[in-house]
Amino acid sequence: MDTKFSTAIHMLILISEAKAPMTSEQIAGSVGTNPSYIRKIAGLLKKAEIIESRQGKGGFSLLRRGDELTLFQIYCAAEETEGVHLFDIHRNPNDRCIVGRNIQPTLGGMFRGIEEKAEQELMRQTLQSCMDVMRENIRREQM
Amino acid sequence: MDTKFSTAIHMLILISEAKAPMTSEQIAGSVGTNPSYIRKIAGLLKKAEIIESRQGKGGFSLLRRGDELTLFQIYCAAEETEGVHLFDIHRNPNDRCIVGRNIQPTLGGMFRGIEEKAEQELMRQTLQSCMDVMRENIRREQM
């Protein structure tokens, strides 16, 4: 289980929606984890210039508009990566075999194409679209 | 590194292209692994009715046409899964918080949508399209 990405989105929704600045302890209480894990994710989001600590006021604030902050940016920040990696390729195919010699470039290109589709979807969605979907869920819950 | 999927594709190209039946030992020599790993993947591909052992003749044969065998079918067989799983969601959000209560259904639906895009790409590609890409790579290598 790697929940850094979902935790980062959860945190950013709280930071975006909270009327008063929220501390790591308060965010941890909503996410269901410990404050040190929240501070770790906050450090990654700060490094990517998505949030900042509110000096002297406690808590965090968003440095970008929700509709300009894509899930791809949040994913890359939380996972410390530059893209989605879905499939590994075996490392030692035999290059004296014509299939062995050509399998890595062949699958490398095809796998990257599939990973790019997932990346494009992550770029299409924003923190704002998460909040819109959540609001719609809440509206239905209350009906 | 999980290379069951790429190994399965490599094996299936060999099985499809070989003029004489290939044994696990010969396939392992091209993939660059040991025969027992090849037999393990072969077992998964047999279970999914993608290949069969050639009784009394040694080696394996394909049970489907290359242009009807999608990468999604190969992926599901090799990974023993029913779909692509990209993102985990934290398990214990606080349901006394409105964000905590709604984060799982919100992200669950959005994440599944992104995973489905990757699945659709895997369904669009076939063993035949891998072989076509490989043939094009080989042609360029020889120019």
Image (cartoon, coloured by chain):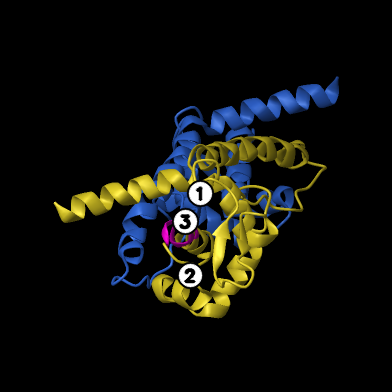
Chain colours: A blue, B yellow
Numbered disc 2: secondary structure: loop
Disc 2: which residue: B22
Q: Is residue B77 visible?
A: yes
Instruction: Residue at 58%, 48% (x, y): give it.
Output: B64
Any mark on residue B16, and which? Answer: 3
Q: Residue furthest top?
A: A143
Disc 1: which residue: A56
How far is the residue under mark 1 from the one under mark 3?
Answer: 67 Å
The part of the chain drawn in magenta is B12-18
The answer to whether A31 is drawn above or below residue A2 in the figure is above
How far is the residue under mark 2 from the one under mark 1?
Answer: 70 Å
Numbered disc 3: secondary structure: helix
Give the dominant element type of the magenta stretch: helix, strand or loop. helix
Observer-nearest of A123 and B51: B51
Horizontal and vertical percent position of residue B107: 66, 39
The amino acid sitting under disc 1 is Gly
Instruction: Residue at 46%, 49% (x, y): give it.
Output: A84
